[in-house]
Image (cartoon, rainbow, N blue to C red):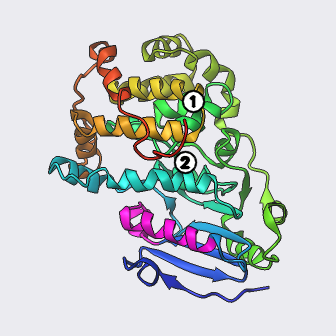
Amino acid sequence: MAGDIQEMSVSDLAGNTEEVILDRVGSAAVIRLNRPKALNSINLPMVQAIRAALDDHADDPSISAVVLAGEGGRAFCAGGDIRVLFDMGKADDPETTRFWREEFPLNYAISHYPKPFVALMDGITMGGGVGLSAHGRHRVVTERTRLAMPETGIGYFPDVGATWLLPKAPGEVGTWMGLTGLEINGADAIYAGLADACVSSGRLPDMIEALGALNAEAGDKGVEAVIADFAISPGQGTLEQNRALIDRCFGFDTVEEVLDALSGEDDDFARHARETILKRSPTSLKLALRLIRAGRESSGLVECLEREFAAGLEILRNHDFYEGVRAAIIDKDRNPKWSPATLADVQSESIDRYLGGRHGTLFPDHRL
């Protein structure tokens, strides 16, 4: 049964733009990311609009569930708008870190949202898009899902709480994801613990209508039942097929040991992983591995977000992020010149600087 659809743009809610559209389908509130030409990459006004909508919906007794989706058919969300961070960082704008200061608390709010939260990870779901979805309670992928944490390829590191999520993946799957930054499909996302169910993309509108037909008091069990009715088998993904190799090669605490282990495997999957890692920023690789290992010992998501924020502040003071963004999206030559250029040239003391920031900046009242 089709529900009433009431559209409200960001400008109606937060005085910003129509880059986020708020719908109402029966008892389901639907938040739609609406930058399809930019693959729904999120910026600060979008973060603010999503947070305002979540806060508003949390207190609405007529809402059974909140659904987050992307417009355009190509992407759920390709991540944060790194060009803005690049420009502001280059200009030494004091507001450069404001995006992270509001994005990371949004990730935490999603992880603790009081109503059923459903993320439709249809299409490209990368970086900040993972932060908007994988922390939620009901995470749906499709046959079009292309998920990745590709940050080491732009001189950055997996953030948005990924250093809390990736260590929870089976074995060393999260380490593989964080170092290589390679894409995975829906089956892999479910196997890695970043998603829960697979639904055909063509049936997502019907599923939203079914969610909207729920009684407002249906709760998580009601939402789970609806998703289960639409779910299909995702099949076996590449990560599950290569789990033994991944565990053999990615269980070390240095990137050099990981590469040595990969070089000893006579396997195309291993060769591709090794070739990919060798193209990434050496500093980012060492930092990402340190952060993922620290995530294993962390008390919770807040501790990881605080650590990531501190590392991000240091990233903005150094070369590789600006060079990585230049090569990827400005000049688009795909030929970054990293500095230091090799893993051997990256000293442990230099990585310590990224991890030495003061905690308690984002969540000063939260006990780590």
Left or right: 45, with 9 as reference point: left
| Tag 2 secondary structure | strand
- Residue type at numbered disc 2: Leu
Going from the N terminus, do you reach mark 2 or mark 1 first?
2
User: Where's residue 265, x and y in %?
Assistant: 56, 14
The magenta region covers 34-57
Q: Residues within 10 Å of mark 1 (few under 14, many from 20)?
A: some
- Residue type at numbered disc 1: Ser
Query: Based on the displayed image, in which of its 4 quarters is residue 40 positioned?
Result: bottom left
Q: Which residue is mark 2?
A: 147
Q: Give the vertical position of 260 relative to 334 (above or below).
A: above
Left or right: 299, with 138 as reference point: left
Q: Which residue is mark 1?
A: 298
Left or right: 318, with 38 as reference point: left
Closest to the observer: 297 or 345?
Answer: 297
Q: Quadrant of the N terminus?
A: bottom right
Closest to the observer: 263 or 289?
Answer: 289
* Residue sitting at x 64%, y 54%: 112
* Residue sitting at x 72%, y 50%: 196
Left or right: 340, with 246 as reference point: left
Query: Based on the displayed image, in which of its 4 quarters is residue 326 positioned?
Result: top left
Mark toward the viewer: 2 or 1: 1
